[in-house]
Image (spheres, rainbow, N blue to C red):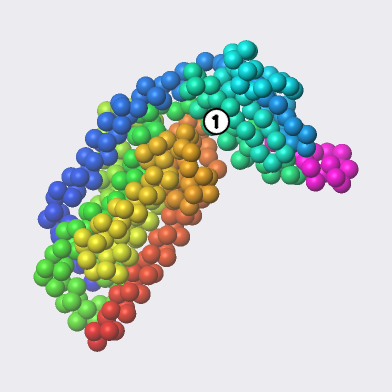
Amino acid sequence: MIRYLIKNNFKLMFRNKWSIVVMLLGPVLVIAVLSSAFSELMKSYESVEEFNVGYRVESESMVSGYIESIREAGKEAGITFYEYKEGNPEELMAKHDLAGFVKFTKEEYVLYQSADDEVEGMTLEYFLDRVMSENVNVSLQMMNATRQNDVELPVQELEFMPAINAVDYYGIIYIVYFSWCGIICATGVFSNEKKYGIERKFRVSNVSEMKLYLGKFIPINMTVVGGMGISTIITVLLHGVHWGKPLLSAMIIFGMILAGNAFGMMLYQLSKNLAITIIVQFTIVWILGFLGGSFETYMFSSTPDFLKHLSPIYHGNRALVELSCMGQSEYVGSAIVYSLVITAICSAIAILAGEMRKRGRA
């Protein structure tokens, strides 16, 4: 029976060919436009020359134990830090031609940026964000070790993400974004199902809700996977988009597709209205994409970290972008787990909603 359901739903999907075309060409066109439009901004970030920054470490600052490590990491990133124990930061910047100035206080840091060096300012801001967010735990460990008079202190290398060009960035993140919008491929299934009362007929024949769900879920995912695969190949051939570790990247994209379609099917099962499903899903995906760097590169985004981490798209984008430019990422595991959890929860809710609706009509 499930084979028949899958075959029948494939036929229904391809009756609405325009939705398939949108999924194929949408990413290609958006990637082409945005990678061209933002190439200069990303290029200026890539080719930024070495620059100087002033700093001051106040008493009991959280970075006092590893300021030398920050200076060394800065040198590797093309940022030279000079210490100024006294003086007004803005006056020191003007006098010594500094691109920025950082005051490390007890629990935070204050960043002064030059209005004439916007690119350097963004680079410095991103560098400090990575350094502080990834090494605050090290600072706490060092303070605890000092209080306990331990001889050895924990040491951690400070890492920063190398530059990535606009083609690679947008060529990756919009495959992720459109993967979350794959439910549009199911419009043929949902519209014909309601028009001809197909689902009602299957319910009369006592087909299990699990089979009805999988009969739609499997062909929708196969269609979106095929569409995103073709779009990816086209963008690689046309624009030279570079994907790091293709098999691992493919697993992450596959997880995003599963999560997006499971979420869409849950919305449809709860509302039984195609228009509401599309509007709600696209609105939520837009918000998740905004938080996750789909419109403003997450490297330069001013959105608080805790909000970014709520978005599964952020985990997917960051994992894939870092795989592309570094060959590794700490976000691979969270991107996959996030996707699988969303898929499982949304699928369970969709099946349960179907069962409750069936019992209500029995």
Q: Residue at x 48, y 42 (%)?
A: 303
**What is the quadrant of residue 241 in the picture?**
top left
In which quadrant is the N terminus drawn?
bottom left
Q: Which residues are magenta?
A: 142-157
Is residue 6 visible in this depiction of the protein? Answer: no
Q: Residue at x 22, y 58 (%)?
A: 186
> Is residue 155 rendered magenta in the image?
yes
Disc 1, SS? helix
Write down the residue under mark 1.
125
**242 versus 53 height, above or below:** below
In depth, the one of 132 and 253 nearer the eye is 132
In depth, the one of 21 and 99 nearer the eye is 99
> Is residue 46 rendered magenta in the image?
no
**186 versus 213 height, above or below:** above
In which quadrant is the C terminus drawn?
bottom left
x, y percent for residue 189: 18, 62
State whether the magenta stretch is mostly helix, strand or loop: loop
Is residue 242 visible in this depiction of the protein? Answer: yes
x, y percent for residue 154: 76, 39
Of all residues shown, which one is farthest toward the right?
A: 149
x, y percent for residue 203: 22, 78
Q: Residue at x 31, y 78 (%)?
A: 355
**What is the quadrant of residue 40 in the picture?**
top left
Q: Amino acid at mark 1?
A: Glu
Question: Dot 1, how many residues are within 10 Å of its Cα: few (below 14), some (14-19), or many (20+)?
Answer: many
Q: Residue at x 44, y 28 (%)?
A: 164
**What is the quadrant of residue 339 in the picture?**
bottom left
